Image (spheres, helix red, strand yellow):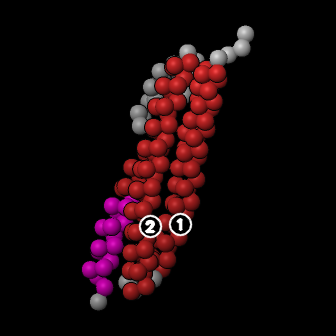
Amino acid sequence: MALADATLLKIEELKEVGHEQRYREQLMVQEFGLSMTATAVLAAVVSARQGTAFAFIVQLFGLAFLLLLTLHLRNINQDRNEALKLKEKVRESLGFQPIHQNIGGRQRRFISVSAPMMMVWYAVALSAGWTVWTFIEGASLH
């Protein structure tokens, strides 16, 4: 029995949306990891030269970097969520059953937030802390 062209098209759409969602998740993880490494290097440079104009300039660049990182992670997460919603909608229209992604509805103990959302929150908290640190360092410069 051959499938209708509309069904085949929906199956291809499901595959493409699934790939897009997984790509966004991988992008977030890679970007987050590399960015945290870069942030640690910047913090080490600032700590080694603390109290100098050079350190303050590095801190300002670090602040701009973290603010852009936060914005970018948030946007990628929103795209990932939209792809997931579309994937579920297409999957349901085809009558497919999910084979992973917590199909049993089991709740994680103590953590109810997704890892990508926690990455965004961490970037927000780090940006806020870096902002405070930058203002304190800027005020202490002579």
Residue 2, percent across and down? 72, 14
Sort mark 1 into few (<14), some (14-19) or many (20+) by Cα contacts within 10 Å: some
Q: Is residue 136 magenta?
A: yes
The secondary structure that dominates the magenta segment is helix
Q: Position of residue 119 (x, y in %)?
A: 45, 49
Vertical order, 41 against 21 (above or below) = below
Query: What element does badge 1 sit on?
Result: helix
Earlier in the chain: of badge 1 and badge 2, it is: 1
Helix, strand or loop under label 2: helix
| Magenta-span inclusion, residue 23 | no
Give the class, few, some or many, for how many residues have Cα within 10 Å of label 2's Cα (few <14, many ≥20).
Answer: some
Q: Which residue is mark 2?
A: 65
Q: Is residue 18 visible?
A: no
Quarter of the image for the N terminus: give it. top right
- Residue at left offset 55%, top offset 39%: 21
Q: Which residues are magenta?
A: 126-141
Q: Is residue 105 above or below residue 48?
A: above
* Mark-to-mark CA distance, 1 and 2: 9 Å
Kind of residue at badge 2: Phe
Instruction: Answer with left or right where residue 11 lies relative to residue 45.
Output: right
Residue 44 lies left or right of residue 4; in this view the side is left
Residue toward you, 83 or 140? 83
Residue at the (50%, 37%) spot, across then down: 83
Query: For mark 1, what is the residue?
Result: 38
104 vs 52, nearest the viewer: 104
